[in-house]
Image (cartoon, grey):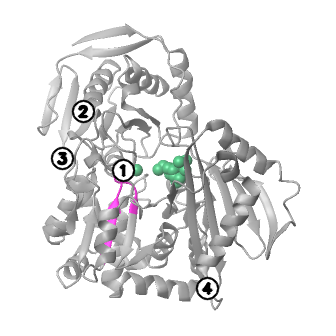
Amino acid sequence: MTIQTRSTQPFSDQKPGTSGLRKKVSVFQQANYLENFVQSIFDSIEITPNAVLTLGGDGRYYNKTAIQIIIKMAAANGFARVLVGQNGILSTPAASHIIRKYKSLGGIILSASHNPAGPTEDFGIKYNTPNGGPAPEKITEAIFEKSKTIAQYKIASFSDVDIEKMGVTHLENFTVEVIDPVTDYADLMASMFDFAAIKTLLQSRFQLKFDAMYAVTGPYAKEILVNRLGAPQSCLMNCEVSETFGGGHPDPNLIYAHDLVQALYATKAVDFGAASDGDGDRNMILGNGFFVTPSDSLAVIAANATLIPAYKQGLAGVARSMPTSSAVDRVAKKLNIPCYETPTGWKFFGNLMDAGAVTLCGEESFGTGSNHVREKDGLWAVLCWLNIIAAKKMSVEEIVNNHWLEYGRNAYMRHDYEAVPTEIANGVMAHVKAQFATLPNQKFGKYAVKIVDDFSYTDPIDGSVSTGQGVRILFEGGSRIVFRLSGTGTEGATVRQYFEAIYDIGDPVDTLEEIANLIEIAEEICELKQRSGRTAPTVIT
Ligand code: G1P
Ligand code: ZN
């Protein structure tokens, strides 16, 4: 095989965010753009003689083109073997599992998660380490530093590898193995859950709908829910993968998963609904006419974990991101296990899981997971719920209502203002921070401010410190408002506002009123609407 060293020029915008590098497809199509980033990854890690690279993506437009380029660059940079999902497909949690199972040096995952796909939409790339999780900041920083000075990259010249057929291609000392993207993951799920009990549930009158939103989880859901668990084919919605994700926005929330919402709210027939995002790591759980907030979902799974075979010995601990509601904290307290509060982004959970400090973790942004992989896992969360329903023989609504009766309730809402001009968004955050000295003890109606800070986190395992992770305004009694700038938006800035109101057991509950009050106070403090001229958030979840 001939290896070419090609000259290149650095690009200034290749800073990987919390979820890797995400840009419009047209940006990735610029000459050497993808190559620069891939070479910067390879230059930031030590490629050992027998190194294996796991490679796959969510199947969006440009996935296959990128895969061929990366295979040739892996060959030129000294990898011994590339494991690639058939047709270039690997959901993010499946990729994490494959990295771990086959002891890869790392993985490259091609995805822009829940962002729309297609020639005029988004593409993304990220590097995961041998533990199967997203690269920690010190590696992403190293990648960025390399990308700023890159002058050349290495690529092998051979014809494109056929990734449509499973099998092994040998190119001198380099091997490409096209693997079934679903089987290993489905086997892992079968080893964790009570498939017999779920099968009995799904073959009773219980009706399930799963919406893959035309993205990567389609084939996974078909294998697990239909082939292995015996659900009827008709339970699958939008499970045909397309390069444009059906022109939709594969983000499982009440707005974008409208087909599923319609199915669960329009009739009494369907008992359980779930959706997953573009790359399969997020999940939304619905009962009939009933929405489970992701924060409550985490708490319910934690409280009932011992009903699931994989967790029957109990949990080592739990973790949630700072903006996630503290519903799971109440469960941890009762179970007498540690609960960690981390910054937003899955990579912070990885260290805790590697050290055995936590078993379950989750974020308010429809991400839930456990130490079986090092990414959040949409279908795993769906199976947790099905396993719990099968064991408790109750509806989703009954399970959640009983949970609130036992632990108290955390009302929760998030407002996103997308594509806000960067200067305005930065101005809003600066304006809030300018009030740090005066806000404590200030009263907004019945709400007295107790503590205000910009969240910072010291990793209990490696001692690394992350500052500036979001402004928290904590009121007497436990209600909170959080302001953060998104790290994943691709246009201007996205400002996120999070609202949480706490009800203890026996408190009178009026979640709508409490949240409405907090929304008003938030505007008074941050002036986002006033400064941006917006009248409403882009997305409410
Ligand atoms: C968003 C979510 C965050 C999640 C990340 C990657 O990040 O809020 O919880 O980990 O996507 O899926 P953000 O845009 O808020 O930085
Ligand atoms: Zn995702």
Q: Which residue is mark 3?
A: 180
- Precedes in sequence: disc 3 or disc 1: 3
Left or right: where 526 falls relative to 368: right
Residue behind label 4 places its C-beta within 8 angstroms of ligand 1: no
Task: Report helix, strand or loop for mark 4.
Answer: loop
Q: Residue visible at 18% across and 60% down?
A: 223
Nearer the observer, disc 2 or disc 3? Answer: 2
Left or right: where 369 falls relative to 382: right
From what the image shows, is residue 179 above or below residue 273? above
Task: Give, as a three-letter code, the residue at label 2.
Answer: Lys
Q: Are marks 4 and 2 in contact (CB under 8 Å)?
A: no
Q: Which residue is mark 4?
A: 509
Instruction: Estimate the spatial distance between the alpha carbons at disc 2 and disc 3, rounded to whole Å.
Output: 16 Å
Label 2 environment density (alpha carbons within 10 Å; few <14, some 14–19, many ≥20): some
- Precedes in sequence: disc 4 or disc 1: 1
Q: Residue visible at 60% across and 83% down?
A: 408
Residue 257 sits in which quadrant? bottom left
Residue behind label 3 places its C-beta within 8 angstroms of ligand 2: no
Instruction: Estimate the spatial distance between the alpha carbons at disc 3 and disc 1, rounded to whole Å.
Output: 26 Å
- Precedes in sequence: disc 4 or disc 2: 2
Q: Which residue is mark 1?
A: 249
What stretch of residues is rendered in magenta? 272-283
Q: Residue visible at 36% across and 15% down?
A: 154
